[in-house]
């Protein structure tokens, strides 16, 4: 009897334990925005329940009674996938506990944890801003971050700081623009999250160098990495001001302000300096510096006067305060490929000079960190004797041209002086002949009339 009681108690305990395990909550970890499928009844269950209820955190989500479905007071988006099993699909799952009751008996329970990445600032950020990305919830899991080019963040980078479930990105650059990824590893689950970081900045480096020489033309521009006229993206901030400054002084002109670029023609030493492009937005300012360095050459004297004479070739740089300490000027004799360049630093005197004794083509190279930025050619003239002969010959040709021009003018005047009187005399003779013909005709007509008056009457004489 005692043994039977023990067996009955054991069976009841096992049945109760089995029911407990059957309704034990299933944990689901999912990334924000991902869908989740929740099943209530098994497909093998052929019974016809009278009442099926889904609840979310204890509040009614959806209910089925007598083949009719009623929505609850919760606003969770769901899709009833199968009315027989009464399974739900959550297109964008929300965190919490989901419970399914069949005829008052709890048959399915799900604990959903939704993982998200949030930013300390939303929308477009300006170049130079700071952004903090945070993962939620923070649990005992391994979190790895990857930048837009799939490079793993190790924590040794100067601008990227990791701390628990967060990542701080200092001094944002246009290279940070794009999709950042977060991989969460756990023995029970793996989650992949992403966050779109939007950075508005300049396409070119913030501190840029341009090089120009005398009478050249150069374009100064500060293009952005994003088209501000893109109408499909409503989050792009509007530019409130766009200014250009030279050496911290505001520039004026119809083609300068409110433009991302402007050109300088016939460049001279006065154009050298620091140019700044500034864009003003509602929440900050973007600023970029363009350093314009002017390079020129000179020769004293300009030509060689004799075989024993020399010429001092100099390369000049303006301005000096913005050039790198690794800058150097080099003079190269181009006519001889085996000659070595003569180089020196222009930092102390704004120039570097070389004494040349050979005529021909010389080249001045402006180098920064051993990289040639601009080159200027200078032709060193021939000896003075040759130059004198060429000058005399050139002057002779000039005198011949002048004499030819004067002779042509004199010939023209002579022709005019001869032709004009001749034409006048011919015209006068023509007029005189015309008058004589008229007089003859008049006399002939008068004589004819007189003869007719003197004619005798034949009848009278008869």
Image (spheres, rainbow, N blue to C red):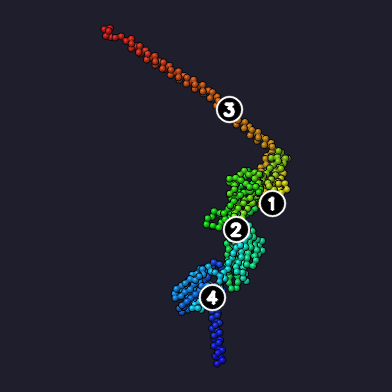
Q: Residues under labels 2 and 1: Cα distance?
A: 32 Å
Residue indicated by mark 1: 324
**3 vs 4, front mark:** 4
Q: For mark 4, does the 10 Å Cα neighbourhood hold few (<14), some (14 to 19), or many (20 or more) residues?
A: many
Residue indicated by mark 4: 109
**3 vs 1, front mark:** 1
**Contact, mark 2 vs mark 1 (Cβ under 8 Å):** no
Residue indicated by mark 2: 125
Q: Nearer the viewer, residue 50 or 121?
A: 50
Report helix, strand or loop for mark 3: helix
Q: Earlier in the sequence, mark 2 or mark 4?
A: 4
Q: Residue at x 68, y 39 (%)?
A: 382
Report helix, strand or loop for mark 2: strand
Q: Earlier in the sequence, mark 3 or mark 1?
A: 1
Relative to 441, residue 414 above or below: below
Q: Residues under labels 1 and 4: Cα distance?
A: 69 Å
Q: Earlier in the sequence, mark 3 or mark 4?
A: 4
Residue 417 point in image, percent of width and height:
54, 23
Residue 237 falls left or right of residue 354? left
Q: Which quadrant holds the C terminus?
A: top left
Residue 40 point in image, percent of width and height:
50, 75
Q: Is residue 150 visible?
A: no
Residue indicated by mark 3: 407
Report helix, strand or loop for mark 4: strand
- Quarter of the view holding residue 389: top right
Residue 139 point in image, percent of width and height:
62, 70
Q: Earlier in the sequence, mark 3 or mark 2?
A: 2
Q: Nearer the viewer, residue 434 or 85?
A: 85
């Amino acid at each position: 009897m005692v043994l039977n009681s023990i067996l009955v108690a054991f069976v009841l305990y096992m049945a109760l334990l089995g029911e407990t395990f059957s309704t034990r909550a299933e944990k689901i970890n999912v990334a924000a925005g991902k869908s989740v499928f929740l099943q209530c009844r098994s497909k093998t269950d052929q019974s016809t329940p009278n009442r099926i209820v889904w609840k979310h955190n204890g509040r009614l989500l959806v209910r089925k009674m007598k083949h009719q479905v009623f929505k609850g007071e919760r606003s969770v988006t769901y899709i009833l996938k199968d009315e027989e099993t009464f399974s739900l699909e959550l297109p964008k799952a929300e965190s919490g506990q989901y419970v399914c009751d069949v005829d008052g008996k709890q048959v399915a329970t799900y604990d959903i944890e939704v993982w998200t990445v949030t930013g300390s600032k939303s929308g477009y950020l300006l170049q130079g801003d700071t952004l903090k990305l945070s993962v939620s919830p923070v649990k005992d899991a391994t979190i790895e971050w990857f930048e837009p080019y799939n490079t793993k963040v190790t924590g040794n980078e100067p601008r990227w700081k990791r701390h628990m479930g967060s990542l701080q990105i200092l001094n944002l650059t246009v290279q940070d623009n794009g999709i950042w990824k977060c991989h969460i590893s756990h023995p029970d689950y793996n989650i992949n999250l992403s966050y779109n970081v939007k950075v508005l900045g300049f396409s070119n480096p913030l501190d840029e160098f341009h090089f120009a020489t005398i009478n050249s033309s150069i374009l100064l521009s500060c293009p952005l990495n994003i088209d501000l006229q893109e109408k499909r993206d409503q989050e792009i901030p509007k530019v409130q001001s766009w200014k250009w400054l030279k050496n911290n002084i505001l520039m004026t002109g119809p083609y300068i302000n409110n433009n991302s670029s402007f050109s300088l023609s016939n460049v001279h030493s006065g154009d050298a300096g620091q140019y700044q492009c500034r864009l003003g937005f509602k929440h900050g300012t973007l600023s970029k510096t363009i350093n314009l360095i002017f390079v020129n050459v000179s020769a004293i004297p300009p030509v060689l006067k004799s075989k024993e004479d020399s010429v001092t070739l100099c390369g000049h740089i303006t301005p000096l305060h913005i050039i790198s300490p690794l800058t150097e000027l080099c003079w190269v004799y181009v006519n001889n490929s085996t000659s070595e360049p003569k180089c020196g630093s222009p930092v102390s005197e704004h120039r570097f000079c070389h004494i040349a004794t050979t005529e021909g083509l010389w080249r001045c190279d402006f180098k920064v960190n051993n990289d040639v930025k601009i080159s200027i050619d200078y032709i060193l003239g021939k000896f003075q004797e040759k130059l004198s002969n060429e000058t005399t010959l050139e002057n002779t040709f000039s005198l011949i041209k002048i004499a030819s021009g004067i002779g042509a003018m004199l010939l023209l005047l002579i022709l005019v002086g001869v032709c004009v009187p001749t034409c006048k005399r011919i015209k006068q003779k023509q007029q005189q002949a015309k008058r004589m013909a008229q007089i003859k005709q008049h006399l002939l007509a008068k004589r004819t009339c007189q003869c007719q008056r003197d004619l005798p009457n034949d009848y009278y004489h008869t």
